[in-house]
Image (cartoon, coloured by chain):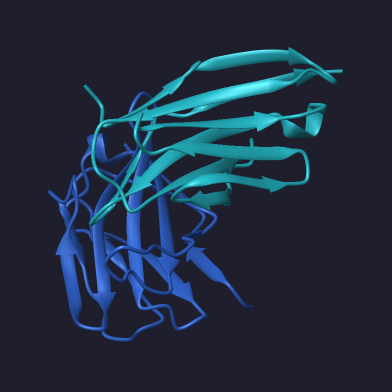
């Protein structure tokens, strides 16, 4: 079983919909990261959090340390949000989930 | 250019050849990493370096060699490439990694390597 599990693997939404991507992990961590990988392949860091909630524009990330669970929410989704979203956890190294491929249709 | 760069961006080679992938960062970050990304596996750590002349194995180090003679460079060498090393390789860097804290990790654009 992977240390970092994401769901769903694939997600298709209509423009404007509220989107949630989930991440569960099974190990102790110092922080959890949400990354975005665009079709061109580049990876950018969206959030790094160790507790609570962070918001950046239409993106919201939450983490529940006791339940070892994090969610990434996208409000008012747009086609330009189409990408692979990757959850990763920091310990002595960094372990990654397999990613969630999001497609937002106009 | 500021940031983290990788070269080449695309490489095709043959089984048994030696290949070196370059990674350069301009921030003087202490930590640098090499990952490979394959369908069905996500990103996996190959090697990392905590500082110049300090390197350590990650999750999938077999068949790879790294060095870090200068803080800004972290080359990855495939000494004798195999088809199973066909992958997309990402270099990354971060400023630090103190116990109990973590810093944002910055990724290079990736190198797509095909081994025929």
Q: Nearer the viewer, residue A81 or B17?
A: A81
> Which quadrant would the C terminus of chain A be assigned to in this image?
top right
Q: Is residue B92 above or below residue A75?
A: below
Position of residue B76 measured from the top left corner of the image (x, y, whole percent): 29, 63
> Does residue B55 appear left or right of residue B19 in this picture?
left
For the point 48% across and 64% down, which residue is it?
B7
> Which quadrant would the N terminus of chain A be assigned to in this image?
top left
Residue sticking out furthest to the left: B62
> Does residue A1 appear left or right of residue B12 in this picture?
left
Kindly indicate the quadrant of the structure image that contains residue A21.
top right
Q: Nearer the viewer, residue B7 or B12?
A: B7
Position of residue A62 measured from the top left corner of the image (x, y, whole percent): 55, 37
Q: Which of A30 and B76 is in front in this view?
A: A30
For the point 48% across and 38% down, which residue is it?
A63
Instruction: Give chain B's shade.
Output: blue
For the point 33% across and 61% down, which residue is it?
B33
Chain in cyan, by letter, is A
> Does residue B109 appear left or right of residue A57 in this picture?
left
Q: Is residue B26 above or below residue B13?
A: below
Q: Which of B58 and B64 is in front in this view?
A: B58
Q: Is residue B96 above or below residue B33?
A: below
Position of residue A5 measured from the top left corner of the image (x, y, whole percent): 36, 25
Query: Can residue A63 be seen by looking at this rendering?
Result: yes
Position of residue B69 measured from the top left corner of the image (x, y, whole percent): 26, 85
> Does residue B34 appear left or right of residue A58 in this picture?
left
Query: Can residue B114 be seen by looking at this rendering?
Result: no
Q: Across the whole image, how many numbered discs are drawn on residues? A: 0
């Amino acid at each position: 079983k992977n240390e970092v599990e994401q769901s769903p693997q694939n997600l298709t939404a209509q423009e404007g919909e509220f989107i949630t991507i989930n991440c569960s992990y099974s190990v102790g961590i110092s922080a959890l990261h949400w990354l975005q990988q665009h079709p061109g392949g580049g990876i950018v860091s969206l959030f790094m959090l160790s507790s609570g909630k962070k918001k950046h524009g239409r993106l919201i990330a939450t983490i529940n340390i006791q339940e070892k669970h994090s969610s990434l929410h996208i409000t008012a989704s747009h086609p330009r949000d189409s990408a692979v979203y990757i959850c990763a956890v920091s310990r002595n190294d960094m372990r990654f989930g397999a990613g969630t491929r999001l497609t937002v249709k106009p | 250019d500021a940031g983290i760069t990788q070269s080449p961006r695309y490489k095709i080679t043959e089984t048994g050849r030696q290949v070196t992938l370059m990674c350069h960062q301009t921030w003087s970050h202490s930590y640098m990493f090499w990952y490979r990304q394959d369908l069905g596996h996500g990103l996996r750590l190959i090697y990392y370096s905590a500082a110049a002349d300090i390197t350590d194995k990650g999750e999938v180090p077999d068949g790879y060699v790294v060095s870090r003679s200068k803080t800004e460079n972290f080359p990855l060498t495939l000494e004798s490439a195999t088809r199973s090393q066909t992958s997309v390789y990402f270099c990354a860097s971060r400023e630090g990694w103190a116990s109990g804290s973590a810093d944002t990790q910055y990724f290079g654009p990736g190198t797509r390597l095909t081994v025929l």
